[in-house]
């Protein structure tokens, strides 16, 4: 099936919203979606949910002959599968998402294989004769943007979770693979946790470029360019892909990377923690239940997120008083001159208790009009009351958007 | 009978999807369509059904192709294919976790996903797996370990109107008498599955009002 084209109206709405400092799902510019990592019944089976993006990774192993050039190293292969399940326009059998699959596979190979975070020599059974080959199959179940981050996380978590069966090498060189029941399986050894962090670059005007972290599918469709950084919390950059038609300055890339390193630390900890927790509960359970009762449907996720937004007052149901609130919001009364960082930046509009949905929309329209009148003029139309949580987020936003002006 | 569980509308980007679990076996089905179809696959008077089955590990092989054909033949009998001429319905099944009942779980997941996608059908359908132990007892919804020790495994798919058989797959040796016994036992078990479908759908729509 063909992909439905994005209408001009949707496109302009999205870019205008971004220009005003809003994202369509009410996240901050540098705010990632909720991430859930769960593990299946078998070792090395892992599902990562990033908002509504779902990825399933599965590690399998077999004994093979090593490469002649590297006789004492095991093999690692990574395969990405995109089926019509992920998105209707993808052809069954990987025909439709060809370019996307290739790009994804390349990023993953650089991050996981070429970064040498997995000790391949530990996969050797007998040099020049037999080694373990690990194969990571990554299936995208639902494509809602940012496949790189999700599949990288899934692959790494699955590899860290994976236990290969023990082997018995007999005197004549024959290798017997022992079943999990007869001897305890051997964990894979991974030195570092590679992380992938993606940023969408949206350029509403020639000279202006805004950075959105963890883009959703629609955001990926309106973005001008993308910055995909593969790194680990130890300070190594393993890959840097920068497709699209955007010219970023060196400092801007450095700022993004600085943020990416902070994010990498969080993700790495999350992955390690999830793996450890699951392995611990697995040790106590007789028969692990795996994914059963652990996977939440997108519908349920949306409902939960809506309740959460309602609870935190980011989203409110418009009432009678909405009309009264609008004129106040339109007033660009917020003094910003004393804070140069705020000048002509696109602030993330956070947590305003009085903020009503309709007034928010009118505020957007108001600032769009303003932008067209005077581009240098301050676009922040709202008194932002920050809570301690969003304060940090806010600072990140300021940091980057300031640099990207 | 093992515990059945189902979640509808599991994937946001598919027209219809369902996560179905029987015991520890979990299958995820997604349905897209009716939508446009390649010229070469187009039928003038009926829909083109495309079924893809992905195992949880490795590439799809001959076994998966068999599963695909069982699902396709089942769906073809039930969906009102003449209502969607010159279109395609894509069905993709992903095995999430396997514990012997992959075929039954996938068939049920596909049925739920088709309902979720509002594809018009004559009836719903349900798959039930049973196995015959060497001692001669029949186990409904066996686990993988039980299947390994059994002498034969059979999966039957029934439709909900008259409870009639619409597809069957069998491995191992079964004589006519045991086959009929298996069939009858599975037919009874299928009634429970249909009542589960009904309860679940009722819950879902009562909830939403």
Image (cartoon, rainbow, N blue to C red):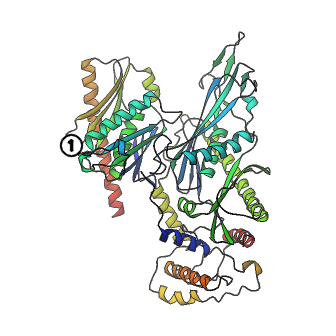
Work out whether residue B114 or residue A86 is closer to the camera in this orientation and state it: A86
Q: Is residue B132 visible?
A: no
Where is residue A203 shown, x and y percent of the image? 63, 69
Q: Is residue A270 visible?
A: yes
Q: Nearer the viewer, residue A57 or A165?
A: A57
A26 in relation to A379, above or below: above
Quadrant of residue A251 in the image? bottom right
B10 relative to B77 in the view: left or right: right
- A276 w.r.t. A320: above or below: above
Q: Chain of mark 1?
A: B
- x, y (%) of residue B30? 41, 47
Which residue is outermost to the top? Answer: A172
Write down the residue under mark 1: B161
Indicate the position of residue A150 as horizontal and vertical percent values: 60, 50
Give the quadrant of the C terminus of chain A: bottom right
Please name the residue shown 25% across and 29% down the image: B184
Residue in view at x 62 percent, y 40 percent: A158
Relative placement, left or right, of B96 versus B208 is: right
Q: In this rendering, is residue A288 above or below A349? A: above
Q: How many marks on residues?
A: 1
Q: Left or right: B174 with respect to A397?
A: left
Disc 1 secondary structure class = loop
Q: Residue furthest front?
A: B39
Q: Residue at x 38, y 43 (%)?
A: B109
User: B84 above or below A13?
Assistant: above
Label 1 CA crowd tier, 10 Å (few <14, some 14–19, many 20+)? few
């Amino acid at each position: 099936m063909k992909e439905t084209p994005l209408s001009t109206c949707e496109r302009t709405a999205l870019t205008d919203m971004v220009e005003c400092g809003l994202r369509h799902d009410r996240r901050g510019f540098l705010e990632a979606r909720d991430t859930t990592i769960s593990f299946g019944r078998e070792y090395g089976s892992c599902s990562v949910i990033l908002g509504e993006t779902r990825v399933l990774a599965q590690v399998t192993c077999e004994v093979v002959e090593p490469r002649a050039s590297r006789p004492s190293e095991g093999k690692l292969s990574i395969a990405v599968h995109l089926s019509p399940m992920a998105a209707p326009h993808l052809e069954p059998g990987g025909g439709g998402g060809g370019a996307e699959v290739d790009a994804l596979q390349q990023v993953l190979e650089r991050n996981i294989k070429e970064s040498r975070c997995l000790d391949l020599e530990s996969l050797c059974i007998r040099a020049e004769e037999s080694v373990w080959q690990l194969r990571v199959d990554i299936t995208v179940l639902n494509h809602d943007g940012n496949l790189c981050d999700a599949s990288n996380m899934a692959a790494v978590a699955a590899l860290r979770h994976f236990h290969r069966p023990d082997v018995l090498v007999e005197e004549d060189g024959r290798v017997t693979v022992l079943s999990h029941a007869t001897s305890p399986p051997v964990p894979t050894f991974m030195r570092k946790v590679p992380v992938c962090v993606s940023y969408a670059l949206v350029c509403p005007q020639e000279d202006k470029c805004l950075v959105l972290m963890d883009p959703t599918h629609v955001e990926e469709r309106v973005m001008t360019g993308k910055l995909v950084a593969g790194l680990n919390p130890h300070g190594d950059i393993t890959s840097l892909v920068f497709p699209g038609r955007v010219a970023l300055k060196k400092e801007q890339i450095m700022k993004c990377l600085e943020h990416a390193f902070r994010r990498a630390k969080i993700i790495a900890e999350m992955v390690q923690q999830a793996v450890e927790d699951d392995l611990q509960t697995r040790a106590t359970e007789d028969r692990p239940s795996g994914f059963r009762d652990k996977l939440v449907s997108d519908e349920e996720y949306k409902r939960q997120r809506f309740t959460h937004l309602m609870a935190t007052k980011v989203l409110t149901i418009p009432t009678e008083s909405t009309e009264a609130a609008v004129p106040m919001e339109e007033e660009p009364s917020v003094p910003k001159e004393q804070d140069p960082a705020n000048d002509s930046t696109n602030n993330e509009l956070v947590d305003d208790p009085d903020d009503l949905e309709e007034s928010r929309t009118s505020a957007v329209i108001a600032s769009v009009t303003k932008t067209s009148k005077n581009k240098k003029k301050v676009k922040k139309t709202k008194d932002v009351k920050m809570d301690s949580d969003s304060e940090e987020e806010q600072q990140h936003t300021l940091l980057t958007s300031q640099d990207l002006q | 009978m093992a515990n059945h569980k189902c979640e509808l509308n599991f994937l946001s980007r598919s027209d219809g999807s369902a996560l179905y679990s029987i015991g520890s076996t979990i299958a995820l089905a997604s349905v897209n369509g009716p939508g446009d179809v390649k010229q070469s696959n187009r039928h003038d008077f009926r829909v083109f059904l495309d079924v893809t089955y992905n195992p949880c590990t490795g590439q799809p092989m001959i076994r998966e192709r068999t599963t695909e054909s069982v699902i396709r033949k089942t769906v073809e009998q039930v969906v009102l294919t003449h209502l969607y001429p010159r279109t395609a319905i894509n069905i993709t099944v992903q095995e999430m976790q396997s514990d012997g009942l992959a075929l039954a779980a996938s068939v049920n997941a596909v049925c739920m996903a088709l309902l979720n996608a509002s594809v018009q059908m004559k009836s719903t359908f349900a798959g039930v797996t049973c196995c015959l132990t060497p001692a001669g007892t029949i186990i409904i919804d066996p686990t993988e370990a039980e299947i390994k020790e059994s002498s034969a495994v059979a999966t039957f798919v029934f439709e909900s109107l008259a409870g009639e058989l619409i597809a069957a797959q069998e491995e191992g040796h079964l004589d006519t008498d045991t086959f009929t016994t298996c069939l009858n036992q599975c037919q009874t078990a299928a009634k429970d599955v249909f009542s589960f479908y009904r309860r679940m759908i009722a819950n879902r729509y009562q909830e939403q009002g």
